[in-house]
Amino acid sequence: MKISMNQHLVKLSNKSLVLTIIKEQAPLSRAEISQRSGLNKGTVSSLVQELLEEQLCFESGPGESSGGRRPVMLLFNQQAGYSIGIDLGVNYILGLLTDLQGNIVHEKKVSNPSTRPHSILKAINTLIRELLDNAPSSHYGVVGIGIGVPGVVDNKGTVLLAPNLGWKNVHLKEGVEETFQLPVLIENEAKAGAYGESQFGSGQLSENLIYVSAGTGIGIGIILKGELYRGVNGFSGEMGHMTIDINGPTCRCGNRGCWELYSSEQALLLKAQAILPTTVKDNITLELLLKEAKSNHQEVIELFHEIGTLLGVGINTIVNTFNPHRVIIGNRLAEAKEWLREPIEQLIAQNYFQFQRENLEISFSTLTVHATALGMAAFSNEQFLKADYQEIES
Ligand SMILES: [Zn+2]
């Protein structure tokens, strides 16, 4: 029997709904799925049967009964497959292998050999190979790879511009897909970080949140009404290049006085040169400055405070623009939260629009450096689960 397009779509979305409920609320019985989804018991039973055959869920022992026969409980089979999530930073590459639920199974971090596309592609390939070697055997194996990059990515996965890597029009997706013959997703790292926080971090509690990725550069990821806002072509969130001083220095993007020139890790390292002895000038890292601050080096602590205030300037604009429930500061600078928190909060407290502070939470990433890689693995898992339905129906 040939089913109509509409029936086809209903079946797809019903099955997707059932799997989502199992994935997010398991353990639960068929009757509970029927109650929560509004689908009748017969439909739920046949969709669950398909999911059991596809090994995406499994049955466990009986649950609590409200009288009568005890129902069989259903669980999501998070180990039916795995995804690889990669955070391509300016000076590091972090790779995670996660199960379909986002639990980290293996992790590896390497330093960037250089920022040239060819060298980075080689390093990413080596990293992916190691993660693949560490994947436990499973029904679907590794289902995809997601790579978060510090730049502007179009909807086709081309890195149009990554100023801090010096990249223009780099076809990263094709390079990795060709080598591994797996689906590859490329996304801006701040968007991936925002998604990671909304799925696994403190963002789970907020429908409207802005993730501020403060690393070598600054970008933001916008979650509105529980969904990532990408913009028409995927270019939203380039707030690091918001001009805060029209007479400021020229940025790599061509504008003057961009926010990230004052409050990013790059700005911190540059300013630290003036306060640290010449012997260490070439080797100043965030890690070194964190160590100095911990051992009570006052000038370094003041420098972190200054960066915090300048971060607060941009965050104030974010608050005034989006009226979010939560602003989460993530990426490398989140490691300095001990010294950044107060100046940021002070600046927000001075906001003329006092009502903006109602229901507003400013926090630091609970996933710290994992947010982007976890977000990318989650994108890959989702794409796999969706693609799976399409394949079954065709
Ligand atoms: Zn700029």
Image (cartoon, rainbow, N blue to C red):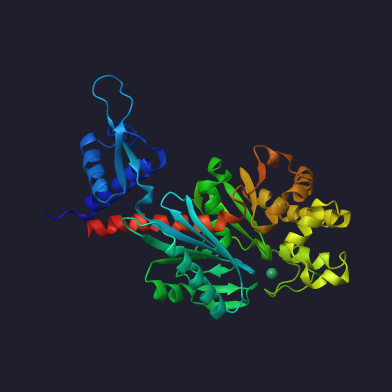
**Ligand 1 quadrant assignment:** bottom right
When the figure is inspected, residue 353 is found, relative to residue 245, above or below; the finding is above
Q: Quadrant of residue 325?
A: top right
**Residue 266 location, x and y as percent?**
73, 66
Q: Is residue 298 left or right of residue 328?
A: right
Nearer to the camera, 218 or 380: 380
How many labels sit on residues? 0
Q: Is residue 99 left or right of residue 231?
A: left
**Residue 157 location, x and y as percent?**
47, 70
**Residue 35 location, x and y as percent?**
32, 32
What residue is drawn where x is 30% and y is 23%? 65
Nearer to the camera, 88 or 320: 88
Q: Can see residue 380?
A: no
Q: Is residue 101 left or right of residue 332?
A: left
Q: Is residue 351 left or right of residue 377?
A: right
Residue at the limit of the structure toward the top, as seen here: 67
Q: Can see residue 178?
A: yes
**Residue 16 location, x and y as percent?**
33, 48
What residue is drawn where x is 34% and y is 55%? 138
